[in-house]
Amino acid sequence: MISVGTILVLNSGSSSLKFALFSGDHCTGHGAITGIGHKAHLVIKGELFTDKTCVLPDLDDCHTTTDATRILINWIESYLPTKSLVAIGHRVVHGGDLTKSMRVTPDLVAQLKSLAPLAPLHQPYNIESINLIAQLCPDIPQVACFDTVFHSTIEPLHRRFALPRNWYDQGVKRYGFHGLSYEYIAGRLSEIAPRAFEGRTLAAHLGSGASLCALRNGKSVDASTGFSALDGLIMGTRPGTLDAGVILYFLQEVRFDAKTISDMLYLESGLLGISGISSDMETLIHNPEPQAREAIDLFCLRITQHAGGLISLLGGIDAIVFTGGIGEHAASIRAQVCQSLEWIGVNLDAERNAAAKPDQETFLSSPQSKVEIWLIPTDEEAVIVRHTREAIGLVDTTYGKIGSN
């Protein structure tokens, strides 16, 4: 069993609830309830769950994120030693202008609700889980850790849209996302690649949500994402950068209402929309249909276009890091992106790339490459648990830097 001082990390979405349990900085078990709203299924891994007496919860009544949260919390509390759960840390996608992780209060929840329209696939479900746990476990502190905080180092000029000035003051600006992942990557670079950490790095978090981040000295200089989680790269079901005139056309000429447009942008576009087959990159890679290939090529093309802009802001590049589900698993995507960036001295070692395992940090550059190329599996949970410990006052100086093994 686990020792006293367990922290639970939650990542709530519309159809899944991911979780991890930590004793100190050590993850003892993790898993997810997937298929929420359809046929819910629990997957668990880790030393905590190797006990053969582990009885899994009944998921027959798991129809919403709230159901999943209630079932998971009740199961975990029954499985762990009494009073060993000391805090719960949440991944919250949008923190607005907040510059650090925050202990949850009613005022903070109200602030996060106001940001829900900017991340509708995530924020409402983050808040649902927070509110339910406050009812079920009022004595257990909760901490909200934001994907936007890491990008608070981006200069104000880079955050502006060319709109009337008053809208910037009302929060219509670029924020940046996937910050918990980029914070982990920066921490690992400081340990394994000091030159890349101290220099100019392009980090590529590629998955069902995808973005690029320009790093200098481990800090965010700019990112491909913006005001909402729609901007930037093509994603699983989101289009990425889009001419605002397209939205005006749908409103004024086609007469779509706001919900129809929102559903199209968040649920029906991206890899799924282009291919008409799937939002899953692995499925598309193995599909012979030409529209699958077209979706892959456009995904990589947009990466190349945004990478060029960010590299120009950095004034050059010393390293590229691939992470996220696609970045860690899809060798062919890494190869295609690197080939498009050969003009800046990027040269991938094909054998290393093909042999790289998604759960291992791997140096992918060839000896001829002027740019370091890395595969670094991300670990947002490790960042969340560190910030949770800090927010509730459980800071132990014996633990290493964020991202250290």
Image (cartoon, grey):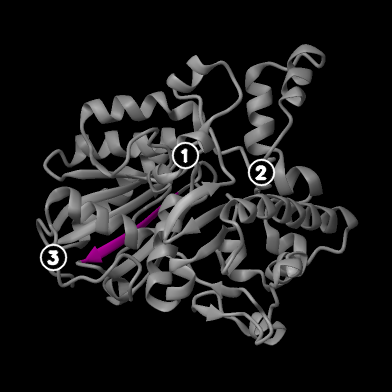
Secondary structure type for disc 3? loop
Dot 3 amino acid type: Asp
Considering the whole magenta stretch, tell me its main secondary structure: strand
What is the spatial separation of the Cα atoms under label 1 and label 3, in whole angstroms? 31 Å
Dot 2 amino acid type: Thr
- First in sequence: mark 3 or mark 2? 2
For label 3, the residue is: 396
Q: Which residue: 40% across, 42% down? A: 152
Q: Position of residue 172 (x, y in %)?
A: 50, 24
For label 2, the residue is: 237
What is the spatial separation of the Cα atoms under label 2 and label 1, in whole angstroms? 14 Å
* Span colored in magenta: 17-23
Residue 382: give its label: none
Quadrant where the C terminus sits is bottom left
What is the spatial separation of the Cα atoms under label 3 and label 2, in whole angstroms? 41 Å
Mark 1 crowd level (few <14, some 14–19, many ≥20, 10 Å Cα): many
